[in-house]
Image: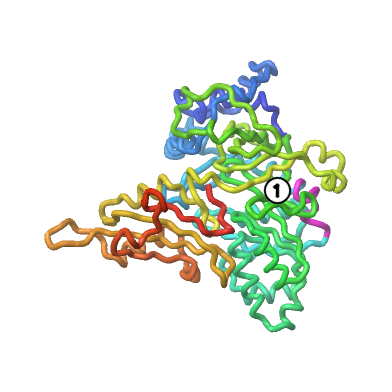
C-alpha cells in the first residue's frame, strides 16, 4: 500500500513497544493483521493520543537494536536510518520495514515530479555524503531516479575539479547536496576562468539539511546564472516527505521555507509550544491537544501514514512551523488527481530549546552538556557561537572553553591539544573544514559572551542568518 489508514497505524501502535513499554517485541505480520481486524475500522481521535518524544522513543530503540532474541522482529528485513551520533551520543538505529521504505521513496519521487522539480531529460549530479552509516546519497539518488532523473553519484569525496569536468562532459544540469556542499562547490566555480564557467549548464539546485537563505541563493545565481533552487525534507524517523519549489509557493522570509507534502502520506499537527514538554511523562500529558489554525506557528508533530510495522505516531519533530493551504499557482501547475491532497508546511527552523544545527548536523544540547561535564576534560564553562563567514557564505562555529588550571599533585586532566582534538571529533570537523570551526581556550569568564542583565554566560550565541536551530 502507498498509504495506510490512520486507524490501522493507531491499531498497530497500541501493541508496539514504541508506545507500550510493557510490550517486549514489535508485533509480527499475524499480530498486525489481527490488531487491524479487531479495530473494526474505528478511528480514535489523534488528538487523544499522547505525544512521543525523541528521548523516550530512542530508549526503546536502543533496547530493541541490542536484543538478539529471534523473536525480536525489529532487527529483521529493515532499512536502517541512523540518527543521534551528530550530538556526540551513541548513534541510534531507526528501523523501517524494507518494503515500506522502498514504497515511500517511490511515492516521494512522484511528489518531486508532480511539483516540477524534476523534468524529462534532467541529469543530476549528487554530492551527498555516504559511509560511516550515513545514507543521504542512496536516499537522494533513489528518490530522484523515481522522479525521472538520470543521476550521477559523485558523493562527498570527489574533488570539485573532477565534478566540473564531469558536469561539462555529461551535460549535467542539476546539482544536489547539502547546503554547505552546494556553497563550497559554487565558491570553487566562482574562481574558474570565464570560459570554464560558461561551459557549465547548471540550471537547477536541489539542496537538503540546512536552509539556503535569500542572500545565499542570490550568490549562487550570481555565479551560475539563472538557476532554480529546490529542497527536499526528510528525517531518519519520518523518512522523505516534503518538497520545496519556490515557483509554486513563492519566496517566503529568510528564516522559513515552504514544503509541499501529501496529507495521505504524513499527518502534520502544529501544537502550541507551551504544550510540548519532553520532561513531562507520557502518562501525565496535558490531555487532548488540538492543532493550531492555519498560519499560526507552533511545534510540528508528525504521524506517518506510510510506516505500519514500526509506526511513527504524534512524534515531536523538534521543528517549528505553520500549516497553509496549497497556493492557487501550485494548484494550477500540479496534476489535478494529486493537488487536492497536498498542503504546505512553512518550516521556520528548529526549536532552540533542544538543539542547533551546524554543517548539516543536529547537535542536542543535552548530550553536549554531558560531554563537556566529563572530568577528564577539565572544563569549567563552555559556550557555542554561530556566525556567518563572509567568504564562504556558510556558518562558522566557535567553541569557547574555560578549563581548570592544572596544579602539581592535582587530578590529571587531558592536555589542551587533546581536548581540542576531541571537540573537533565530536563536531565532525573533517579536513578542509577547519576554517569554519575553531576552539578558543579562554583564561577567565571575561572571554565569554554574557547577558546584559544578569551578566551570565550565554551558553548558545546565534549571530548567524543561515542558522536552522532547534
The residue that label 1 is drawn on is 258
Q: Position of residue 161 (x, y in %)?
A: 63, 77
Q: Which residues are magenta?
A: 111-120
Q: Position of residue 185 (x, y in %)?
A: 63, 70
The quadrant of the image that shows the N terminus is top right
> Residue placed at 29% from the left, 56% from the top?
379
Res. 68 in view: no
Q: Position of residue 166 (x, y in %)?
A: 69, 73
Name the colouring of the figure: rainbow
Q: Position of residue 30 (x, y in %)?
A: 60, 24
Q: Where is 365 relative to 282, above or below?
A: below
Q: Where is 169 relative to 111, above or below?
A: below
> Residue placed at 68% from the left, 17% from the top?
42
As helix, strand or loop, the secondary structure at mark 1 comes to strand
Residue 458 placement, left or right of 15: left
> Residue placed at 58% from the left, 32% from the top?
314
In depth, the one of 98 and 441 nearer the eye is 441
> Residue placed at 52% from the left, 47% from the top?
82
Residue 198 placement, left or right of 421: right
In depth, the one of 70 and 184 nearer the eye is 184
Mark 1 surroundings: few (<14), some (14-19) or many (≥20) residues within 10 A: many
Q: Where is 23 relative to 375, above or below?
A: above
Amino acid at each position: 500500500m502507498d498509504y495506510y489508514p490512520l486507524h490501522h497505524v493507531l491499531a498497530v501502535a497500541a501493541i508496539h513497544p514504541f508506545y507500550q513499554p510493557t510490550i517486549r517485541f514489535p508485533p509480527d505480520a499475524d499480530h498486525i493483521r489481527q490488531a487491524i481486524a479487531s479495530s473494526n475500522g474505528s478511528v480514535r481521535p489523534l488528538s487523544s493520543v499522547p505525544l512521543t518524544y525523541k528521548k523516550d522513543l530512542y530508549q526503546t530503540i536502543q533496547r530493541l537494536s541490542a536484543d538478539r532474541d529471534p523473536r525480536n522482529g525489529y532487527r529483521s528485513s529493515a532499512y536502517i536510518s541512523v540518527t543521534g551520533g551528530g550530538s556526540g551520543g551513541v548513534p541510534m538505529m531507526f528501523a523501517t520495514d524494507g518494503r515500506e521504505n522502498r514504497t515511500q521513496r517511490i511515492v516521494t519521487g512522484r511528489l518531486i515530479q508532480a511539483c516540477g522539480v524534476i523534468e524529462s531529460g534532467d541529469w543530476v549530479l549528487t554530492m551527498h555524503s555516504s559511509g560511516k552509516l550515513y545514507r543521504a546519497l542512496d536516499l537522494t539518488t533513489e528518490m530522484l531516479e523515481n522522479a525521472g532523473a538520470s543521476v550521477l553519484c559523485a558523493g562527498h569525496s570527489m574533488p570539485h575539479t573532477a565534478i566540473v569536468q564531469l558536469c561539462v562532459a555529461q551535460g549535467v544540469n542539476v546539482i544536489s547536496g547539502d547546503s554547505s556542499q552546494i556553497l563550497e562547490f559554487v565558491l570553487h566555480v566562482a574562481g574558474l576562468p570565464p570560459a570554464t564557467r560558461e561551459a557549465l549548464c547548471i540550471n537547477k539546485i536541489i539542496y537538503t539539511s540546512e536552509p539556503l537563505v535569500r542572500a545565499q541563493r542570490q550568490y549562487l545565481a550570481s555565479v551560475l546564472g539563472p538557476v532554480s533552487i529546490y529542497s527536499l525534507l526528510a528525517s531518519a524517523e519520518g523518512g522523505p516527505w516534503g518538497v520545496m519549489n519556490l515557483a509554486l509557493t513563492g519566496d517566503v522570509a529568510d528564516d522559513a521555507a515552504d514544503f509541499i507534502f501529501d496529507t495521505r502520506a504524513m499527518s502534520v499537527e502544529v501544537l502550541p509550544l507551551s504544550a510540548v514538554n519532553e520532561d513531562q511523562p507520557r502518562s501525565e500529558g496535558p490531555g487532548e491537544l488540538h492543532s493550531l489554525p492555519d498560519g499560526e506557528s507552533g511545534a510540528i508533530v508528525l504521524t506517518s501514514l506510510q510506516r505500519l510495522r514500526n509506526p511513527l505516531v504524534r512524534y515531536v519533530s523538534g521543528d517549528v512551523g505553520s500549516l497553509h493551504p496549497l497556493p492557487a499557482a501550485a494548484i494550477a501547475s500540479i496534476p489535478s488527481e494529486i493537488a487536492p491532497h497536498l498542503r504546505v508546511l512553512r518550516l521556520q527552523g528548529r526549536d532552540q530549546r533542544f538543539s542547533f544545527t551546524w554543517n548539516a548536523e543536529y547537535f542536542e544540547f543535552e548530550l553536549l552538556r554531558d560531554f563537556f561535564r566529563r572530568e577528564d576534560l577539565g572544563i569549567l564553562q563552555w559556550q557555542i557561537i554561530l556566525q556567518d563567514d563572509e567568504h564562504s557564505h556558510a556558518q562558522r562555529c566557535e567553541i569557547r572553553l574555560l578549563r581548570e588550571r592544572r596544579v602539581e599533585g592535582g587530578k590529571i586532566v587531558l592536555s589542551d591539544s587533546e581536548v581540542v582534538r576531541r571537540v573537533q571529533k565530536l563536531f565532525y570537523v573533517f579536513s578542509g573544514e577547519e576554517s569554519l570551526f575553531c576552539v578558543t581556550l579562554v583564561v577567565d569568564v571575561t572571554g565569554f559572551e554574557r547577558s546584559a542583565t544578569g551578566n551570565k554566560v550565554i551558553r548558545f550565541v546565534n549571530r548567524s542568518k543561515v542558522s536552522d536551530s532547534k
